[in-house]
């Protein structure tokens, strides 16, 4: 391979790396920036003053809260995942062993 061919190949590889990794790096940077901009204390102060309504939780927050109490138990009748402390199944309303 001649010198010009190696340089062209190196340039093409560099462009490919930027084209593939660039959007991912930019997206992750944007995500981190948005996390830093979120100011829960400011929102709480504005809600206390009555300046804004309390925001509704995002779907990701609801999912994280719902999954925090899952302890791995399942209903023996229908197989629905049981949340910690449940005494009966949410799906079939039958008693679950180990519930409070």
Image (cartoon, grey):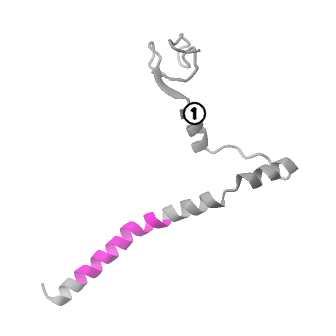
Residue 14, position as x, y percentages in the image? 32, 77
92 is within the stretch colored magenta: no
Q: Which is nearer the eye, 65 or 77? A: 65
Quarter-of-image position of residue 10: bottom left
Look at the picture and state if 74 lies above or below 59.
above
Residue at image position (55%, 15%) is: 99
Residue at image position (74%, 52%) is: 41
- Highlighted magenta segment, given as a residue range: 8-26
Relative placement, left or right, of 80 versus 56 is left
Mark 1 falls on what kind of element? helix
Residue 74, position as x, y percentages in the image? 46, 20
Residue 62, position as x, y percentages in the image? 60, 38
Relative placement, left or right, of 25 versus 56 is left
Where does label 1 land, which residue? 66
Residue 98, position as x, y percentages in the image? 51, 14
Look at the picture and state if 11 lies above or below 97.
below
Task: Quadrant for the C terminus, please.
Answer: top right
Q: Is residue 50 visible?
A: no
Quarter-of-image position of residue 8: bottom left
Q: Main secondary structure of the magenta part?
A: helix
């Amino acid at each position: 391979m001649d010198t010009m061919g190696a340089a062209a190949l190196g340039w093409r590889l560099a462009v490919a790396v930027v084209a593939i990794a660039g959007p991912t790096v930019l997206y992750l940077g944007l995500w981190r920036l948005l996390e830093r901009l979120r100011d829960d204390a400011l929102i709480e102060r504005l809600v206390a003053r009555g300046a804004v309504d309390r925001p509704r939780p995002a779907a990701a927050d609801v999912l994280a809260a719902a999954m925090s109490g899952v302890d791995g138990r399942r209903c023996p009748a229908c197989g629905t995942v049981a949340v910690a402390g449940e005494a009966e199944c949410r799906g079939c309303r039958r008693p679950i062993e180990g519930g409070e």
